Every structure is written in C-alpha cells, then in structure tokens.
Image: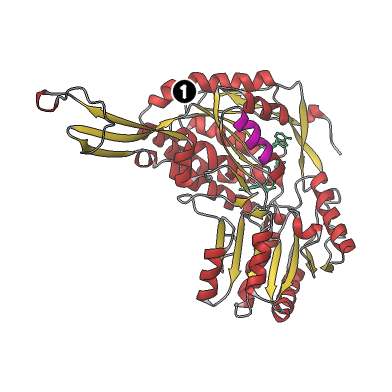
Amino acid sequence: MNNDKSVTQTIGHLIDGQRVNDTARTQPVFNPATGQVSGHVALASQATVEQATASAEKAFPEWRNTPPLKRARVMSKLKVLLEEHADEIAALITAEHGKVLNDAHGELQRGIENVEYASYAPELLKGEHSRNVGPNIDSWAEHQALGVTAGITPFNFPAMVPLWMWPMAVACGNTFVLKPSERDPSSALFIAELAVKAGLPPGVLNVVNGDKEAVDTLLRDARVKAVSFVGSTPIAEYIYSEGSKHGKRVQALGGAKNHAVVMPDADIANAVNAMMGAAYGSCGERCMAVPLVVAVGDEVAEQMIAGLSAEIAKMKVGPGTDNGNDMGPLVTKAHFDKVKGYVDQGVKEGAKLLVDGRGLKVEGHADGYFLGPCLFDQVKPGMVIYQEEIFGPVLGIVRVKTLQEAMQLINDHEYGNGTCIFTRDGEAARYFTDHIQVGMVGVNVPLPVPVAYHSFGGWKRSLFGDLHAYGPDAVRFYTKRKTITQRWPSAGVREGSVFSFPSSR
Ligand code: NAD
C-alpha cells in the first residue's frame, strides 16, 4: 500500500477564494477500488476554521445587499460550468467514493438541479405584501438572510449533498462554510472553485476539510447562525443538540432503514427490477437505499427471492471506472469490515443467507473493498440486521401476512426516512401513503427522492429539526422572516392617542 505522502496530493481548504493548505494534521484518502492512498486530506485546526468563518462574516454585508437576480446569475453560470466539467467531477467522485461513473453522473445531475432551483431565488424571495391592513397602513413580510451559515456533509453523496445546501443558502444572501466528508473531499472542493469561477465573491463560500475539531469549532462559534447536517443518526443528534445549545438554527438529517412492501397483487417483475437498483445501487450506500423487502404472504416472498436471485447472478461487480459494472467497492476498509460483520451477525442470528457476497474476488483488485451482493431471507424484527442501518449491498426479506402487519413494522422502526409499496391496488396504496410514519413515500417507485423543487427529509430519528433540506423549505431555513407594518401619517388619517390594543374596528 502506498502511504507515502510525498507522492500523493494534499487536499486542502478554500478560504476567501484561495486554496489554503493547513497540513499540520492530515488523513489519507483511499481509492476504494485499489486500496491505494490517493491523497491526504488536511484536517483543519480550530484557527483555520475560524479564519474561514471570519472570511464568510466579512463577505456577508455586501453579498446580502447584492440584488437577488445577480446572486441568481452566479448560480446559472455555475450550472453551465458544472455541466461542462461533469466528466471531471464524476471521475473525482468515483476515485474517492468508488461508485460507478454513470451513478456519479446521476448524483451530480441531481445536485445541478438544486443549483438550477437556487437560480430562481428572486422569485422565491419575493415575500408577501398586504395593502391597507388598516387605514393607510401597509404590511409586508420579507425573507432576510441569516449571516454565516454552515454545512457538514456525509461521504455517500460527496457532490450532491453539499449542493443541497450552499447554493440555496448563498442565493438567499447568506455566506457559507462547508465541511465535506474527509473520506471523499475532492469533488466538493473542485465544485467550490467552479463557483468562484462563476463569479461568487471571495468569502461567500468557504470549504474547510476536517473532522470533529472542525465541526465542533463551527458548532460553537457565535458567528455561525445556522447549520445544516447530513450523516449518521448519532452524529445528527449530537449536531442538533450541540448546535441548538449554542443558539443556532439546526437541521440534521440522519440514517435510515427503508422498507419496501410488496403486495400479492404487485407486478413482481417490476418490483424485482426496482429492488435490484434500490438495494445494490451505489453498493447500498444511499440513505434512500432499500435494504428490506417486506413480502406480504409467503408466495410473494418466494417469487421475490426467485426473481432477485436470478438478477443477482447477472450482476457485475468491479471498479467504478468501468460503466459495465453494476456496483463498485465500499468506501473504506473500515466500512467494508463493518458491513461484512453485519452479514456474519445475520447468519449468527438465524437469518437465512441465500446469496453470500463475502467471498467475492475482483480480478486485478485484490486490495479493493469489494463485497458482493448479499440476500437474506427470514429476517426478523428482533435481529440486529433488521434494526440497524448496514449501508452496504445487503438485502433482507421479512415475511408478514397482512399490509397492516407490514405497516406496523415500519411505523415501529426508529427510522422514518423513505419507504415504498408495490401494488396494483389504489385503495391500499392510498391507505399506505396516508398512514405510514415516514417522510418520503413511493408507490411503485423504490427511491422516492423528492426533486429539487420539493424538499427532502425523513421523520422520526432520520431528521432532527423542523425544516427539510433543499426546495421550498430551504428558503425558510436559510432566511428569517421580518414583517414590517408601515403608515405615513397625513392629515386625513392622523389619529389621537389610542390605549386599547390596535384591531380592525
Ligand atoms: P457520518 O455521520 O460518519 O459523517 C457525516 C459528517 O459528520 C462528516 O462530515 C464527518 O466528518 C462528521 N462527523 C463524523 N463524526 C463526527 C463527530 N464525532 N463529531 C462531529 N462531526 C463528526 O456519516 P457518513 O458515514 O459520512 O455518511 C453515511 C450516513 O449518512 C448514513 O447513516 C446515511 O444514512 C446518512 N445519510 C443520510 C442522508 C439523509 O438525507 N437523511 C443522506 C445521505 C446520507
């Protein structure tokens, strides 16, 4: 393994529009397909993070007063640059995350759609106006920027999740400090540099790479007014409580365990195809992945198992640089060990391992973090592999007898990010969508990820905070409402002193 820092690049920070290398502490970044070190990411010190926050604070007054249309034009320009550089960005994602290039392009495209939405900022920020709320009195509400805002993002969508956050934050007139995942930091940094090229003034968007030290510095700095977080539930909960304790507005999106209910009347072939992508796409490292099929009736379970086993046998697993592969490696050796440990645990717990991906060898990639697709039957609610988020290519079948039983399982689960139902019965689907305790629901759609002009968020322990990510909720999250009531006294409407509470008499 190549751990020699001198022959690999250092991935630093972007502060005040400039690359900054604070290399006192670094951490290796790996190519998951080869197990080789591809670079070293700088882990920002408290002083470096404070420098980024100071830069954002300095840039705020002018950026806040920049007309929204001009801010939006930067987003329009960025969209074009992102499209022009899509191949480079996808290559950076694949090199550090491992996902297949086509999938990296898909993630980037969904990110670009958030940039596109942010370019509608003038329309979104228009506010509300009422004339004559009283005699000659007008009242209006406007969305004012908060100041310095921050985002902390996970490894699994290194380009898209940052784009859920900062484009809307800056389009609303805020400045931003982004702390990407230290496991695959390069694409977010590259995109931030494109934003500077698109015309974002220095300091409006800063990127600090780092770990807990950087995050804690942001959480405790009084200049940071709001924090958006996406990552695992224990950290989301920590970010929410620590950020709130320091007086910040916080939205913290956490982990998931998404169930797909398959009804006896479903189009089984369609459900099988949908589940293949939902369970194994991006190696199961998606918060909207579907690691559990809840089969209503044994016959459905048998049909799903037959279909899934046949499709799994056709799957190609290998480096993400080859678009002929369906699935790449897991992100790190530590994550590989964790996911493999869950498979071992499932076997010990008594679930039936029908397809075992643990022995997979990818030719020429002996040190890569490849785990083949795994399929369990007889997964039961008491098992750890049912309860915990595995975040790997492991699909479990749970057998139930009725839709009610399936829904009870989902509603009892600690997570409530996404779910879906496969059925031809509109009444069942409507009942399901109405009563299920989950934030994002699909009907014959396995990954119901809202588009950029809706908002994204789960329920229960999948989200801490009130507002969802991106879309209309982002306007609310990244602004504070100010309501102004105005009267210009003139001879006809001048009143004497009034001591009773003003009302519309
Ligand atoms: P993670 O929680 O390990 O890390 C997320 C971020 O938190 C990173 O930037 C990391 O540096 C930082 N961090 C980690 N430990 C910290 C600590 N102790 N104190 C302060 N900061 C810390 O998550 P991950 O492994 O990068 O991402 C996978 C997780 O993210 C999964 O649980 C997945 O479900 C979740 N996720 C959720 C959504 C969603 O929208 N709900 C989307 C994508 C990913």
Q: In which quarter of the image is the N terminus?
A: top right
Q: Mark 1 points at which residue?
A: 60
Q: Position of residue 239 (x, y in %)?
A: 65, 35
Q: Which residue is drawn at 17% across and 23% down?
A: 496
Q: Where is residue 123 in the image (x, y as percent from the top left)?
A: 35, 42
Q: Is 244 colored magenta in this rendering?
A: yes
Q: Which residue is drawn at 69% across and 58% down?
A: 413
Q: What secondary structure is the stretch in magenta mostly built from?
A: helix
Q: How crowded is mark 1: few (under 14 residues within 10 Å), some or many (20 or more)?
A: many
The one of 341 and 143 positioned closer to us in this rendering: 143
* Helix, strand or loop under label 1: helix
Q: In this view, does 484 lie to the left or right of 80?
A: left
The one of 81 and 263 positioned closer to us in this rendering: 263
Q: Give the range drawn in magenta.
A: 237-245
Q: Position of residue 114 (x, y in %)?
A: 49, 45
| Above-or-below relation of 387 to 267 | above
Examine the rendering and report whether any part of residue 326 can be seen.
Answer: no
Question: Which kind of residue does numbered mark 1 sit on?
Answer: Phe
Q: Which residue is drawn at 47% across and 51% down?
A: 454
Label tally: 1
| Above-or-below relation of 174 to 103 | above
* Residue farthest to the front, as pictured: 500
Q: Is residue 108 left or right of residue 27?
A: left
Q: In which quarter of the image is ligand 1?
A: top right
| Above-or-below relation of 128 to 429 | above
